[in-house]
Image (cartoon, rainbow, N blue to C red):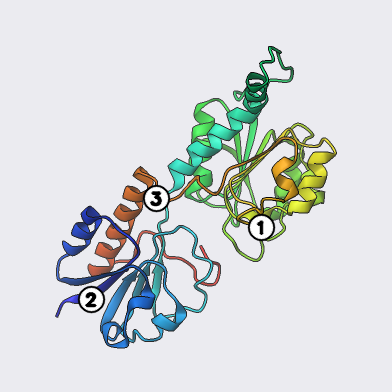
C-alpha cells in the first residue's frame, strides 16, 4: 500500500514533480490544510507544510510532519508519537549573507553616505571601522549563527558564540559560552548578532540593561525573532546615543505600524523580514531539497537530519 503524503502550500510544477517521484507514495497537494476533508486525512502518514492542530487530530496514522520553515516553536501540541522536522540548514547561508551585508554597511556608514548623496553633500565621515580584527558575537549557534561566524572569520573577524549548551565548538570560534555567561562577553564585542528561535526564554532577552552592557559603538543585528529585543528599550538606548547601529530584519511588533517611532530612530536600519524568505530564488530550492531529503530518510526508516524538540521549538 502506498504511503500517503499531503504537501501544503503554493509550489511550482518542478517541486510537485519531485514530490510525485518519491517511491511508493501517493502525494496530494493542497494550498492549505483547511481544504482537506476528514476522509482525505484518515490514511495520511506524512504531512509537509504548516499544520493546524484541528487537522492533525484527524490523521490517526500521522507519523512525520515536515515544515518548510526553520521556525517550529508552535508545535508543542503535536502528539509524542509524531516526529517533527524543519528546514534546518536551508536558510543559514542566505541569512548569514544578509547579516554580513548589514555588518559592513554599518561599519562603513553606508546609509549616511547614501543620505549625503541624496542631499548632494560631499563630506568625509569619521569613525569608519575595519571588519578585520573586530570581535563578532553570534547569540544563537544554529545553522544561521554558525554560517555567519564562518563568513565573518573568513574576513578576519574574531568570532565568539552563545548557545544553550556547549558542544561542537567550530575551529573558527575563539570562545563559546552559555546564556548565563553571555553578559561577560557583551562589553567587549563590536558586533552582537541574534539568530534565536522564538522561545519563552528568548523573549525580552535584550532589554535596556543588556543593551547598555554592549559597547557604545557596537552594532546590534537581529534576524531571529523580533521579541528578543525590547523595542521601547532599544529606542531609548539609541536616542541616548548608545550603539553605533541596530540592524533589524525582525522586530516587535511586526509588521511595524506606519506611525511607529522605530521607523525614525537614528541609526536603526530596518528590513521587512526578508533575509530568509524561502520563496526567494535559491532559498526555495534549498528548502525543497531539505524537505525531500528528510522525507526520503523517514520512508527508509531513518530519522530526519534534524528532529525538532517540540517543547523547545527548535
Q: Nearer the viewer, mark 1 or mark 2?
A: 1
Q: CA distance from mark 2 to mark 3?
A: 25 Å
Q: CA distance from mark 1 to mark 2?
A: 39 Å
Residue 154, image x and y in percent? Answer: 49, 28
Question: If the image is split into quadrants, where does the N terminus sit?
Answer: bottom left
Residue 229, image x and y in percent? Answer: 70, 52
Q: Which residue is mark 2?
A: 4
- Residue 212 visible in the snapshot: no
Q: Which residue is mark 1?
A: 253
Q: Residue at x 40, y 57 (%)?
A: 87
- The residue lying furthest to the right in this view is 240
Q: Which residue is mark 3?
A: 90
Q: Are marks 2 and 3 in contact (CB under 8 Å)?
A: no
Question: Between disc 1 and disc 2, whose residue precedes?
Answer: 2
Q: Residue 180: which quarter of the image?
A: bottom right
Secondary structure at badge 1 equals loop
Q: Nearer the viewer, mark 3 or mark 1?
A: 1
Amino acid at each position: 500500500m502506498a504511503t500517503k503524503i499531503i504537501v501544503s502550500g503554493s509550489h511550482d510544477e518542478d517541486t510537485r514533480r519531485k514530490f510525485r517521484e518519491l517511491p511508493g507514495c501517493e502525494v496530494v497537494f493542497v494550498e492549505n490544510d483547511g481544504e482537506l476533508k476528514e476522509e482525505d486525512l484518515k490514511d495520511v502518514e506524512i504531512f509537509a507544510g504548516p499544520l493546524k492542530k484541528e487537522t492533525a487530530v484527524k490523521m490517526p496514522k500521522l507519523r512525520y510532519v515536515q515544515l518548510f520553515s526553520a521556525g517550529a516553536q508552535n508545535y508543542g501540541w503535536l502528539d509524542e508519537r509524531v516526529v517533527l522536522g524543519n528546514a534546518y540548514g536551508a536558510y543559514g547561508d542566505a541569512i548569514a549573507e544578509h547579516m554580513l551585508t548589514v555588518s559592513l554597511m554599518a561599519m562603513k556608514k553606508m546609509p549616511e553616505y547614501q543620505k549625503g548623496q541624496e542631499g548632494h553633500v560631499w563630506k568625509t565621515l569619521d569613525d569608519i571601522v575595519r571588519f578585520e580584527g573586530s570581535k563578532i558575537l553570534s547569540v544563537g549557534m544554529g545553522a544561521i549563527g554558525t554560517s555567519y561566524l564562518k563568513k565573518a572569520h573568513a574576513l578576519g573577524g574574531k568570532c565568539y558564540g552563545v548557545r544553550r549548551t556547549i558542544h561542537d565548538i567550530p575551529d573558527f570560534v575563539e570562545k563559546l559560552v552559555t546564556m548565563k555567561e553571555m553578559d561577560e562577553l557583551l562589553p567587549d564585542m563590536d558586533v552582537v548578532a541574534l539568530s534565536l528561535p522564538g522561545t519563552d526564554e528568548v523573549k525580552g532577552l535584550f532589554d535596556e540593561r543588556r543593551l547598555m552592557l554592549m559597547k557604545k559603538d557596537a552594532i546590534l543585528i537581529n534576524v531571529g525573532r523580533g521579541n528578543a529585543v525590547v523595542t521601547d528599550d532599544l529606542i531609548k538606548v539609541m536616542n541616548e546615543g548608545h550603539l553605533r547601529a541596530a540592524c533589524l530584519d525582525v522586530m516587535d511588533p511586526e509588521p511595524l505600524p506606519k506611525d511607529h517611532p522605530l521607523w525614525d530612530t537614528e541609526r536603526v536600519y530596518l528590513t521587512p523580514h526578508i533575509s530568509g524568505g524561502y520563496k526567494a530564488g535559491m532559498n526555495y530550492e534549498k528548502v525543497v531539497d531539505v524537505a525531500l531529503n528528510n522525507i526520503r530518510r523517514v520512508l527508509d526508516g531513518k530519522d530526519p537530519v534534524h528532529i525538532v524538540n517540540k517543547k523547545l521549538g527548535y
